Amino acid sequence: MELGIWLLIGILATWRLTNDITSSIELAGPLRLYELIHKIFSHPRMPEWLKESDTCPFCVSFWIGHVVAVFLPVYGALDWLHVIGAYLAISWAISGAVTLYIRRMQTIYGVDTREV
């Protein structure tokens, strides 16, 4: 498949996971994974900035974009330096697309995507 298709798949996967994790509706998720993530982030020993980051769609999409980019089969026969650069560019592009989508929904429709 082309790079554009893989990026679109990565963007959609990142948006879906971001929306599920930051949703105001308490979702348990597959194998109660989202519930586990919320428990980890609400642990008393967690710093305050981390406790608040599991409800921020921009923060969550940044980290999920990195995880999704690892699994995209777009790196081919690049040497290690180009793989690292491509990985960072793709993960930031995925997170950026999700951020643009969230901001667009908030601006045009006045929708908080965490409540959808």
Image (cartoon, helix red, strand yellow):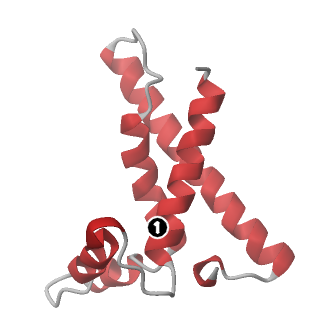
Please provide percent x and percent y for residue 29.
Answer: 37, 71
Is 110 left or right of 67, judged from the image as shown? right
Name the amino acid type tagged 1: Cys
Q: Nearest the camera: 18 or 80?
A: 18
Secondary structure found at label 1: helix
The correct choice, above or below, for 112 with respect to 59 in the image is below
Q: Nearest the camera: 44 or 13?
A: 13
Q: Nearest the camera: 101 or 23?
A: 23
The correct choice, above or below, for 52 with respect to 86 in the image is below
Q: Nearest the camera: 28 or 24?
A: 28
Q: Residue shown at 59%/36% (left/top)? A: 7
Please provide percent x and percent y for residue 84.
Answer: 37, 28
Q: Disc count in the image?
A: 1
Is 87 left or right of 103, judged from the image as shown? left
In the rendered view of the protein, which quadrant contains the C terminus? bottom right
Seen as rendered, the residue at the extreme front is: 31
The correct choice, above or below, for 109 with respect to 84 in the image is below
Is 81 left or right of 36, judged from the image as shown? right
Q: Residue shown at 42%/14% (left/top)? A: 76
Seen as rendered, the residue at the extreme right is: 108
Q: Residue shown at 43%/39% (left/top)? A: 69
Residue hosting label 1: 59
Label 1 crowd (10 A; few <14 / some 14-19 / many >=20): some
Please provide percent x and percent y for residue 111.
Answer: 74, 81
Is 25 left or right of 106, judged from the image as shown? left
Seen as rendered, the residue at the extreme left is: 45
Seen as rendered, the residue at the extreme top is: 77
